[in-house]
Amino acid sequence: MTYSSLQHGLLNLPGSTPQSKTELLRLLRLDYEQYHCVFNTAGMHNHLSHHLLAAYDLGAPTPLLTSIFEKEAALQRPADLGEVGFDLTGAPQVGEVNEGNWTKWLGDERAYPAYVNFFADIVRQQGISGAVDEYLFGKSANEKGVSMLLRFMGGLMHPIIHLGFGIEFAEPMMVTAGLAQCAVGTDSLLPGVDPIDPKFNTSPSNGGLPLLGVLRDIYDSSVLTPIMPYDADYEYPQRFRDLLADGQRQREMERIVDSWHIDVNNIDRNVEEAILVTTLIVFGTGKSGRLPRLDFFTNHFLTSAIFFPSILNALPNASQKIILLKTWFFYLGLWLVDRGRPRIDSTLLMSYSAFPKPPLRQVVHADASAVGAPNSDEDTNPWPIMLGCVIHAPDAHTIKTFRALYWASQQYGTRTAGSFHGVFDNRSGLESHRGISKVDGTLFVRAAGILMDMMGWVTYGEKAGKWDRSGLGWDAAWEVDDITNREKWRALEYEDLRWQFEGKEATEGDARARL
């Protein structure tokens, strides 16, 4: 597959140069040709291209893109798992997968190179929109056991993110790899769900609810209770499987999510709802008087929602837009319950500073000729300061989250308190969530400040932070004091995820050798 011309990203911030674009495309190709979509047997996903594209969209210079590649590539497995000792008996050869047999190897990670080759031909022949239309939303692509749309939601929404980057940047290699990632992913965590069922491709006849109202019903449901008692070591995917074992929570979530009113003639409002709700879930579910905890799993709600403007625009018909949004929030809702059903506290989020700043080691005094008060927080735009730091964050999730918040602030930063859709329940007339009517467009910069504080101002000397995995929706998770909890997750170094490469650790030197 040849390079695309690379369309501008959602932000397209200044900083890109002919050299950085050329280097980005070269590094994307290396990832596409050399590495698998998951980097270990636990199914952890390759974020290399995500990291590169997010950084590029934020204006990262050429040497930084190269450094990102070297760090991320050190984790990866080769696309051909036979190179590292996998038994490839029964796995397809490159060129063996075709339109007549493409469903035969679904869920088999060994088939990834063959699926990449197959979908490269499909994208070349049908274009990006045509390939997505047929292989994600087509009837045959969603028959029992095929379930491509559920696979699209699987893997903690990573296929959405990967393919979403491809659509946003009009990059066929990313779309191809995203479809291949769906194909080798699993649909087993959502048994019996049919997203193409008519209930998921129409809006409710009674007008339905705003997304904040849907979230309210998820919180109020006596069926959607988390697994009890709390167990800090009871982790994915077993807890998720147990959550769905009797089918009751699944059916209840389907019923509630189906009430979301999707207006295909005003789909931008639904995107805004998705961004607002996911920001509240990631950054507004802590405890007053405690250090914020940013949940690793719910973080993916926001970093997948940012791709809806691009993906929805690529879908040819209204029913597909409804199916995508409702299936996504259905899956998100189940994940929310899996994390202990953490409750949003908008008052807490709005209590964080709207003028975040790094831990400055010295005060720089402005000249008397400067207009205003440059040394005052209120006279300073915090976004450029955060931007200059976050592009150097070692974790891809951090920069992707920041990019989503930056875009949200661009789009919705001037919203006044009470103006977000759904802050007042259209059934009772009361606030859908306590304090929600006080939320304004500054919530995104407040959230970005908390992101920087918790994940580390690394260019100002702070150690990189870690995402929380405690299960913050359970009150029992908060019985662990903040420092102990933070250090527990900080002890998991990024390099600890490094895959053992043929009996020796892969290193950044190995990655440089592949450049």
Image (cartoon, rainbow, N blue to C red):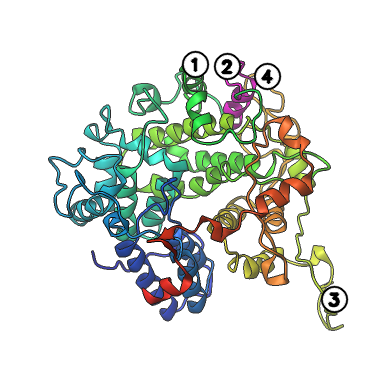
Q: Nearer the viewer, mark 4 or mark 3?
A: 3
Which residue corresponds to mark 2? 223
Inter-mark Cα distance, 4 to 1: 27 Å
Of pointers 4 and 3, the one earlier in the residue sequence: 3
Q: Quadrant of the C terminus?
A: bottom left
**Residues marked 2 and 1 touching at CB (< 8 Å):** yes
**Residues marked 4 and 1 touching at CB (< 8 Å):** no
Residue 363 numbered mark, or none = 3
Residue at image location 36% in from the left, 70% down from the top: 25
Q: What is the magenta range? A: 212-226
- Mark yes or no: residue 399 visible: no
The secondary element bearing badge 3 is classed as loop
Q: Amino acid at mark 2?
A: Val
Percent across and percent down for residue 29 are 33, 67
Inter-mark Cα distance, 2 to 4: 22 Å
The secondary element bearing badge 1 is classed as helix
Residue 248 numbered mark, or none = 1
Q: Magenta region, mostly helix, strand or loop? A: helix
Of pointers 2 and 4, the one earlier in the residue sequence: 2
* In magenta stretch: residue 222: yes
Q: Is residue 457 left or right of residue 134?
A: right
Q: Amino acid at mark 4?
A: Ser
Of pointers 1 and 3, the one earlier in the residue sequence: 1
The residue closer to the viewer here, 188 or 364, is: 188
Q: Nearer the viewer, mark 3 or mark 2?
A: 2
Q: Residues within 10 Å of mark 4 (few under 14, many from 20)?
A: few
Of pointers 2 and 1, the one earlier in the residue sequence: 2
Residue placed furthest toward the front: 503
Inter-mark Cα distance, 2 to 1: 7 Å
The image shows residue 430, relative to residue 152, as above or below, that is above
**Residues marked 3 and 2 touching at CB (< 8 Å):** no
The secondary element bearing badge 4 is classed as loop
